[in-house]
Image: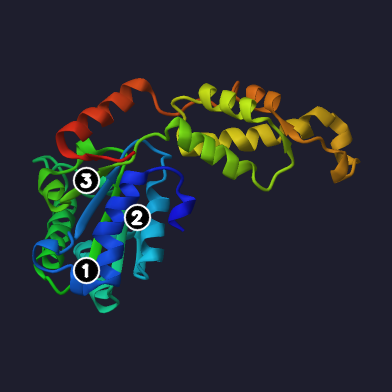
Amino acid sequence: MMSRTVGLAFAKQALREIVILPTLRPELFTGLRAPTRGVLLFGPPGTGKTLLAKAVAHESKATFFAISASSLTSKFVGESEKLVRALFATARELQPAVIFIDEIDSILTERKDTEHEASRRLKTEFLMQFDGVTSNTDAKVLVLGATNKPQELDQAALRRFAKRIYIPLPSAEARLALLQHLLKNQDYNISASEANDIVQRTEGYSASDMNELAKDAALGPLRELGDDVLHVGADAVRPINFKDFVSAQATVRASVSPESLAQYERWNEQYGKTGI
């Protein structure tokens, strides 16, 4: 399944060392080699952080808990803390386990004097349970967080994510591989030089942007048919071509601005490790 996450060689290698190998060969990862219990995946939206997390759980044969901020919050006093305790207790019972929390900044934002007491209690309980995982060398529970806003994380929470892996926008090579993957089961007529041209035109696109671009381009042959699309057979639809991608770019733009990308790179230089 890791092969489905195009590119990101550094991130894949890091996660293999941190999660997959220690789970499959625990006798080799003791003492100084003991795996970390907290990993943070950060970077622009649409770069494959969630898919990487699912791939990790699949290849490590671990029980996978996909948690959102909303599933840990409750309007009833004390209920959120109970949900957090139940989550970690269940993960320990079913270990090896991966607790994946998408948009983790939603529940572990920097603590402020003006924040609601319920939010503060939720953060405190989460960090206490996290400490229980990290202090127990026998526990095979990994907390894997993903965020598009790493700069908003509380410093106490950030400290517990010992490994912080930057998931950047796909390189030209990764965009080409992704384009080939998206077109694999489609009827298309795009030469190698045209594919490289598409890659050059999509500088700054995320993996999600590339997916949306390909989807829009795939509709080009149908749009060309106009009202006849209701009557013609499937074999009358022409293959997807280069011009369809050029037309699709008029509506599907890069979703990550250069300014926000610069912010990720600055944060990565200060706190993270680069994924390529």
In the image, which is nearer the foreground, mark 2 or mark 3?
A: 3
If you read the primary sequence from the N terminus, does the residue marked by circle 1 or circle 3 appear first? 1
Identify the amino acid type marked 1: Lys
Name the one closer to the observer, 266 or 32: 32
Identify the amino acid type marked 2: Ser
Residue drawn 36% across the image and 45% down it? 9
Give the CA separation, mark 1 to mark 3.
28 Å
Residue 68 marker: 2
Q: Secondary structure at mark 2?
A: loop
Visual colour scheme = rainbow
Q: Write down the residue under mark 3.
A: 164
Which quadrant would the C terminus be assigned to in this image? top left
Give the CA separation, mark 2 to mark 3.
19 Å
In the image, which is nearer the foreground, mark 2 or mark 1?
A: 2
Whether residue 76 can be seen here: no
If you read the primary sequence from the N terminus, does the residue marked by circle 2 or circle 3 appear first? 2
Q: Secondary structure at mark 1?
A: helix
Q: Write down the residue under mark 1.
A: 82
Q: Position of residue 242 (x, y in %)?
A: 68, 26
- Compared to residue 84, the image places residue 46 above or below, namely above
> Is 260 on the left-hand or right-hand side of 254?
left
Tell me if mark 1 has few (under 14), some (14-19) or many (20+) residues whose alpha carbon lies within 10 angstroms of its own: some
Q: Which corner quadrant of the image does residue 266 belong to?
A: top left
